[in-house]
Amino acid sequence: MTTTPRAQGATVWLTGLPSAGKTTIARILAGRLRSEGHRVEVLDGDEIRRFLSAGLGFSREDRHINVQRIGLVAEVLARNGVLAVVPVIAPYADSREAVRKRHDASGTPYLEVHVATPVEVCSQRDVKGLYARQAAGNLKGLTGVDDPYEEPVDPALVLHTQSQTPEDSANAVHALLAGRGLA
C-alpha cells in the first residue's frame, strides 16, 4: 500500500495593531492558497475570543493565555499539513516567542509577519470603532494607544499596509511562503 506524502503545513502569524489589516490580508491569502489546492485554516482572533477563549479579559495574563491557546491550535493544524493563517494582535513579544518555541519543538514552520500599520492609519480605518470608543473615554487598554504593543524584533516579513493594497500584502506573504517551499 502506498501513501501520498502529507503536505507541509506551516503557521503564518500576522501580528499588528487593531485595524492594521491582518484579517483582510489573511482572508485574501487563504483564498489564494485554497485555489492552489492547499489545506488552509484562518484562526481569526475575534472568532477565537468568542469561542475558544470566551471568558478571558484583556489583562496581560489573559492576553497571554489567549495567544497560547491560538498558538497550540495553529501548531497542531500546521503539524498535520494545514497552512494555519493567524491574524491576531498578540501584543507581547514573550507570548509570540512562546508560540514560536512550540512550533520549533515540533519542527513545524512558523512565520511571523508584522503588519506594521501606523496607529494613525489604524485609527482612521477603525474597522470596529475601537479607536473612537477609546477617544471618547469608553474603552481602556486599547493596544497601541493606552496599552503596549511590542513590535516583532526579527519578523520573517514586514508589511506596510498604508502604502500597499491588501492584495499586494497578501501576495508578499504568499511569496514568502513560496520562497520557503511552503506554497
Image (spheres, rainbow, N blue to C red):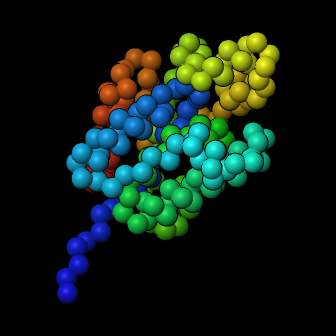
Is residue 152 in view? no
Residue drawn at x 67%, y 50% is 53
Residue closest to the eye, 5 or 182: 5
Residue lying furthest left: 2
Residue found 35% across the figure and 21% down from its top: 165
On screen, residue 157 above or below 161: below
Question: Does residue 132 appear anywhere in the picture?
Answer: yes
Q: Residue furthest front?
A: 51
* Vertical order, 127 against 34 (above or below): above
To which quarter of the image does residue 176 belong? Answer: top left
Where does the image place residue 33, in percent across and percent down from the top left?
29, 46
Judge whether 44 appears above or below 172 on screen: below
Q: How many marks?
A: 0
x then y, percent, for residue 122: 56, 19
Residue occupying the far bottom of the picture: 1
In this image, 36 relative to 126: left or right? left
x and y, in percent, of residue 12 in the image: 44, 47
At 73% from the left and 18% from the top, the residue drawn is 134
In this picture, residue 106 sits left or right of residue 17: left
**Quarter that holds the N terminus:** bottom left
Q: Position of residue 25 (x, y in %)?
A: 41, 33
User: Where on the picture, by quarter, is residue 138?
Assistant: top right
